[in-house]
Amino acid sequence: MGRRELITAIGSSSASLYERSMKIHKRITDKMAAGFPSGTFSRIDTTRSLGETRTDFIRDAVERELKRRERLASMRAQVNVSRSMEA
């Protein structure tokens, strides 16, 4: 089954996929090249969702990790403020 048939099979038209792609590209202004350990892409390919690209997968993973770290930093800052008020 080709990519177009696969997209049709999951109920998405190629136009909507194109439109989604264009919206994503308009939002992206920061770019970087990154190296990954051997086997990373095959691991990504076996776990990504139907219709999801490697780029989508990596972008989503980075966004989730940033949010997690931002929450953690916020919690640490609150603890530090509490400690400084106690002193």
Image (cartoon, helix red, strand yellow):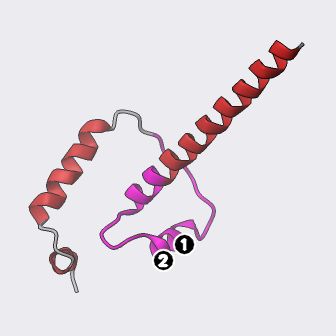
| Residue behind mark 1 | 43
| Cβ atoms at labels 2 and 1 below 8 Å apart | yes
Residue type highlighted by circle 1: Arg
Residue 47 locus on image (x, y percent): 48, 73
Q: Residue 69 falls in which quadrant of the image?
A: top right
Question: Label 2 neighbourhood size at 10 Å, few (<14), some (14-19), many (20+)?
Answer: few
Image: 54 above or below 67: below
The quadrant of the picture occupied by the N terminus is bottom left
| Residue 44 highlighted magenta (yes or no) | yes
What is the CA distance from the residue labelled 2 to the residue labelled 1? 5 Å
Q: Secondary structure at mark 2?
A: helix
> In the figure, is residue 43 to the left or right of 84?
left
Work out whether residue 5 or residue 10 is closer to the camera in this orientation and state it: 10
Residue lying at the far front of the rendered structure: 86
Magenta part of the chain: 32-60
| Residue behind mark 2 | 46
Residue 7 locus on image (x, y percent): 20, 74
Q: Which residue is at a point 59% across and 35% down the rendered structure image?
A: 70
Q: Which residue is at a point 43% across and 59% down the rendered structure image?
A: 57
| Residue 59 highlighted magenta (yes or no) | yes
Q: Which residue is at a point 18% across and 60% down the rendered structure image?
A: 17
